[in-house]
Image (spheres, coloured by chain):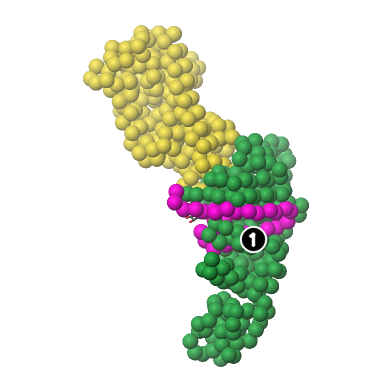
Chain colours: A yellow, B green
Amino acid sequence: MIRYEFLMQIRKRSLWISMGLLAVITVLGQGDAGPRYLPDDASARVVASSWAFLWSLLLPIVAGMVLADRLVRDDRLGVSRLLESLPTTATTRVMGRFLGALAATATPIFLATVIAGGAESISREDPAVLLWTPIAFGLVLLPGLVFVGAFAMVVPLLLTAPLFRVLFVGYWFWGNMLGPSYMPSLAGTLLTPVGDYTASWLLGERALYAGADGWLQLLRPEPNGVTAALSVALLLGVGLIPLLVGSRVLARRATA
Amino acid sequence: MDITIRNLRRRFGKVEALRGVDLELSGGMFGLLGANGAGKTTLMRIIAGVLSPTSGQVLIGGHDMSTRQGRVAVQRRLGYLPQDLGLYPDLTAVEFLDYIGLLKGLDDRTARRRQIAELLEVVGLSDVANRKLKGFSGGMRRRVGIAQALLGDPALLVVDEPTAGLDPQERIRFRTLLATLPGRRTVLLSTHVVEDVAQTCRETAVMVDGRIVFTGAVSDLVRGAEGVTWEVVTSGPPPTVGEIVSAVSDAGGTRYRVVSVTPPDPAAIPVPPSLEDGYVAFMQGAAAGRSSA
Ligand SMILES: Nc1ncnc2c1ncn2[C@@H]1O[C@H](COP(=O)(O)OP(=O)(O)O)[C@@H](O)[C@H]1O
Ligand SMILES: [Mg+2]
């Protein structure tokens, strides 16, 4: 079942086009702090993490966009009534769809990290960069994708997909990139899906705002290995909440 | 699978879609006949366990549909073709059926694949088995719909308006297909097209405004129009007595088929009734009963 959820998502042309476009924009638009301008003696770990963090600034926006229709489209396509009549529970359906669609959505992002890692390995003559690439992907990108993907699939059940998409873009910049010293935001907290804490730990310096003083001081400890792990755990744990809520909503709807 | 329904009611806000339905049925093909809005889809959704009644009781194969266990037990042996079923456009026919098969709990991969191939053969879609569903015509989609319903060899098959929106040729093909389905199972077919029932079912129920007003053999429903079915050929105005079932232009004028207790015209000749006439006669009687009540 996960296989088919994966197939349906990976066959979406909009997934590849928008990921591709945004990846190009990301590469061209990276500032002086971008991984392209890292010194020649930068370690493989720093190079790979730096790329992963760069990808995680914008690509998850596309992920949220293309995952937003996954549950609501059953109604639009007229498949809901059939699915509800099948003996599989709503929880299993939601989880299967989440895993399959998320894996498909993460595929182009993973490819982007591998391409960047491969290119760096060659230009720096250091194969270790390619070895660090999946690790950086798993730590910096994946937890945030799980978090964002779970909300993206379920919130549209309550708000409709177009409204969710608008709010989501606003949230993304507010919750990740708006410095906490300008106005209260979730940027730089353990719940920042951009992977600020894990990237900061891997890079050995603050990636963006991780741990910077601001609103909700409790969620802003010093970035280090322990707090990076805590951030991953929190993102995954909180990501589970919308999935459980979504299962409940669909189960109730099935016997309205 | 036996179905027993007692005093079933369902209300949507102010609309009472079901107003006390009683129904008993066992094996074979059963036709649920009624105009649009009569409550057929509401009834079928309750039987499929995807809608809760406001009150009343539904027992299917001994399982109480008001409990979760009861619903799941029935759903394991159910094939359901919802009205206006949509399909995932980006899957092929085989992939879609495999997906539904998995959700039906058919876990043995080889057995599932074999069954899918057989069903595609039955519904005549083997040639396009590996084509994306987005290219399928209405009739082809409907056949995918019936194939998914048949997955897992269900003991109860619920098909809601399976011929609606099909062209005449597809409609006939589809009816022929439906007529082959019963075997040992119970098939519940809903339709607003009298001919669908006439061609496929022996037993039928007629639904009007959320109530079942007739249950019995199709032949009994036909018999109800005996002696009240007439044909009149006239080039003048159409008959004003009774209800016109059909009108066909002919050389000598228009040939009207009329259901009426009294002859609609001095020249009217009595003719043997069809199910359509029986249905019209029955509805007339029901309307008269209601207005006098
Ligand atoms: N989900 C719903 N919400 C509100 N009204 C509904 C709903 N489903 C059906 N109805 C109403 O209930 C009545 C019966 O509808 P339905 O069961 O679809 O009839 P049929 O299938 O015989 O055409 C109609 O008046 C319809 O408008
Ligand atoms: Mg209907």
Helix, strand or loop for the magenta stretch, by majority: strand
Q: Residue at 39% x, 22% y: name it.
A: A193
Is B262 drawn above or below residue B145 in the view shown?
below
When asked about the image quadrant of residue A235, the answer is top left
Q: Which residues are magenta?
A: B13-41
The image position of residue A243, as x and y in percent, is 49, 29
The image position of residue A51, as x and y in percent, is 40, 21
Is B42 drawn above or below residue A163 in the view shown?
below
Q: Residue at 44% x, 51% y: name it.
A: B14
**Camera-side residue of A64 and B12:** B12
Q: Residue at 65% x, 39% y: name it.
A: B70
Q: Is residue A15 left or right of residue A166?
A: right
In magenta segment, residue B39: yes
Q: Identify residue for label 1.
A: B205
Q: Amino acid at mark 1?
A: Ala
Q: Is mark 1 within 8 Å of ligand 1?
A: no
Is A57 drawn above or below residue B248 in the view shown?
above
- Tell me the subunit letter for badge 1: B
Q: Residue at 52% x, 84% y: name it.
A: B239
